[in-house]
Amino acid sequence: MHHTTGLTGPAPRATVSVKPLVLSAPQRGEDQHVRITAPTTGTSLPVVLFAHGFGSDLDGYAPLVDHWASGGFVVIQTTHLDSKRLGLPADDPRRPEMWRYRVQDMRRILDELTTLEASVPGLEGRIDHSRVVAAGHSFGGQTAGILVGLRVTDPRTGAAEDLSDSRVMASIQLATAGKGGDELTPFAHDNLPWLRDQDFSHITAPGLVVAGDKDDLPLSTRGPAWTADPYTLSRGNKSLLTVRGGEHFLGGISGHQVTETTDENPDRVALVQQVTLAYLRHVTGTDLTDWKNAQAVLTDGHPLGRLESK
């Protein structure tokens, strides 16, 4: 059955997308490829720095990226080292540090933002560098979290350092891992060692967490509630959108008609699109009414999801 969300949003603008913009990164071992999607009109545009899930690339997540850009945001994506596109061998020495290379990728984009901006026709001078939100899906949600203060214990050194970046004002974490310890499955403990110990308590920046209530990953023994940890275990000024019936791809956010989506549902995608855009506009101070409307509409009785804040 088709449900309208009952949410509101801005009139969509035309967008332009440019790729690949190439950043030299000798210590990374591969040049870093970047894609920018931006509205063709408007100035003082805020930025969304988006981190893909494990194995994806800068061409993923069109349903979200296009929606955010058409809603007035400059969306920047990159291809991280775990991408299937790069095909790093299983014994590549960079593999255990994948999570850290991702954070460095995001910092490099921020360092080179002026250069990147000048590489997109018509974009120069239209970005507000003071308003940057980090967003990510799955593994990318951890990347976004680290930029605002999530601390990951390095599996090689045992240290949990602060890798946050003061240039990032807020985060959106979609279908993202929760806390580690004895709640991890043996598979996750062995293959994703950067999930063994995550500390959410230092995150002070505002954030939105999006969790599917049917997202039962083979990584934790706790079931779908595990992906709400980034909300429940962090401090205040956070919001949680629980997507009813949502599995790991939340109805299909990683692309249109993609085979990896197990719960394909256009209504679910529309919900995630509209709530995340309303949040982006709210947290960057662009517009507050759509977010207030979402909070009013997405209460216990809504068929698609529930929005709560603390």
Image (tube, helix red, strand yellow):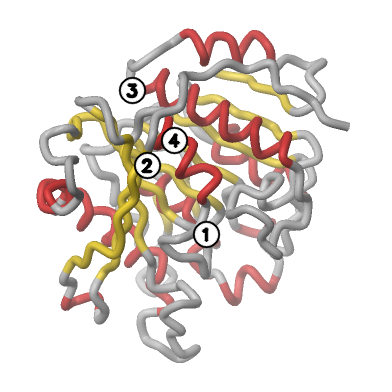
Q: Is residue 34 above or below residue 190?
A: above
Q: Residue at x 57, y 34 (%)?
A: 273
How far apart are labels 1 and 3 at the CA level?
A: 24 Å
Q: Which residue is the site of mark 4?
A: 68
Image position, residue 4 (x, y; %): 74, 23
Of the image marks 1 and 3, the number of the one nearer the N terminus = 1
Q: Residue at x 45, y 61 (%)?
A: 59
Q: What's the mark number on residue 134? A: 2
Q: Secondary structure at mark 3?
A: loop
How far apart are labels 4 and 3 at the CA level?
A: 13 Å
Q: Which residue is the site of mark 1?
A: 53
Q: Secondary structure at mark 2?
A: strand
Badges 2 and 4: C-beta atoms under 8 Å apart?
no
How far apart are labels 2 and 1 at the CA level?
A: 14 Å
Numbered disc in front, either 4 or 3: 4
Of the image marks 2 and 1, the number of the one nearer the N terminus = 1
Of the image marks 4 and 3, the number of the one nearer the N terminus = 4
Q: For the C terminus, give its image quadrant.
A: top right
- Would residue 290 be found to the left or right of residue 308 on screen? left
Q: Secondary structure at mark 1?
A: loop
Badges 4 and 3: C-beta atoms under 8 Å apart?
no
Of the image marks 3 and 2, the number of the one nearer the N terminus = 2
Q: Secondary structure at mark 4?
A: helix
Mark 1: which amino acid? Gly
Q: Which residue is the site of mark 3?
A: 284
Say which of 147 and 200 sits in front: 147
Mark 4: which amino acid? Trp
Mark 3: which amino acid? Thr
